[in-house]
Amino acid sequence: MATACVNNKPSSIQSGPDSSISITGHAPEILTHIYDTHIKLCIYRRTMNAEVHDYANFLKNTFHTLQLTQTASLHNLNDLLCASLPQHQYRQSFINDMYTVMEMFACLFELNQIGFRLCVLNKSMCPRFHTDKVPCRLITSYAGKGTEWLDCNAYSSNFLEMLNQKSGHSDSVQRLNSGDIALFKGDKWEGHDNSGVIHRSPDLNVDETRLLLSLDIIHQK
């Protein structure tokens, strides 16, 4: 499989504390800006190839109980996914894409193992705005609605509660596109104690589903 490793020593970008906490680009190198001081969210906007898209929708529409949570290394990922995912003519294309995403994550954080969750969701997993109690998490929706987030360092608890009560759209709420790869700094990122990216799961209509992949940092003891 082709390497997807990106340089994890990016040049710094200038950003004031009151400006946007996010950065967006159309090349994987945008993810290296997760190391910039004032950036808390990196979004790699990409277009999935047709085979990956078709398999993702096959899973989303057919396997509503899919819940695959594992700790894996890159060298055993292919075998693990082949044993866990249903047969389809484009299954290997989907596995190759997952490998590429996980390889980028492993390269950025110099990981030998990665915690991942691949699941089909038919309801909002985390409907209220929150931050994650992790250093950093990769989130991508292979199919269906993307994760919602706020492009800010902090909002008052009253304003967040107002947003949590609203099921419709708000100008303050951003949403990832299907296929976007996003790195979210969490509360345990060094120097960002308890100030991770504020985000939530999107509201899903009846009979609506999404296919979500999330990756977490696993440090060997």
Image (cartoon, helix red, strand yellow):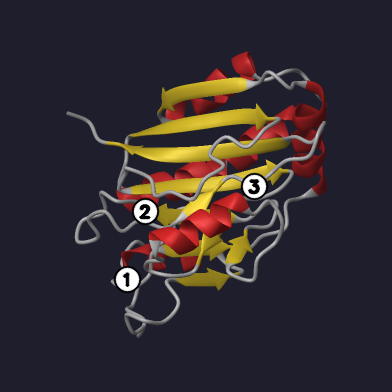
Q: Considering only order in the chain, which callout, 3 or 2, is on the residue closer to the N terminus? A: 2
Figure label count: 3
Question: Which residue is drawn at the image coordinates 37% and 66% (left, top)?
Answer: 154
On residue 202, the disc is 3
On residue 108, the disc is 2
Amino acid carrying mark 1 in the image: Asp
Q: Position of residue 105 (x, y in %)?
A: 43, 47
Pointer 1 and pointer 3: residues touching (CB < 8 Å)? no
Q: Nearer the viewer, mark 2 or mark 1?
A: 1
The answer to which of 118 and 186 lies nearer the viewer is 186
Asked if residue 202 is positioned above or below residue 37 in the image, the reply reads above
How far is mark 1 from mark 3, CA to CA?
A: 27 Å
Q: Position of residue 5 (x, y in %)?
A: 44, 53
How far is mark 2 from mark 3, CA to CA?
A: 27 Å
Check disc 3 and report its element: helix, strand or loop: loop
Is residue 4 among what the camera can see? no
The answer to which of 66 and 76 lies nearer the viewer is 66
The N terminus sits in image quarter: top right
Is residue 12 among what the camera can see? yes
Q: Position of residue 171 (x, y in %)?
A: 64, 71
The C terminus sits in image quarter: top left
The answer to which of 63 and 172 lies nearer the viewer is 172
Q: Considering only order in the chain, which callout, 1 or 2, is on the residue closer to the N terminus? A: 1
Q: Position of residue 73 (x, y in %)?
A: 40, 29
Question: Residue 205 falls in which quadrant of the image?
Answer: top right
| Crowd tier of the residue under label 1, counting other residues whose Cα lies within 10 Å: few below 14, some 14–19, many 20 or above | some
Question: Residue 185 falls in which quadrant of the image?
Answer: bottom left
Pointer 2 and pointer 1: residues touching (CB < 8 Å)? no
Amino acid carrying mark 2 in the image: Leu
Asked if residue 57 is positioned above or below residue 11 in the image, the reply reads above
Check disc 1 and report its element: helix, strand or loop: loop
Identify the residue under disc 1: 36
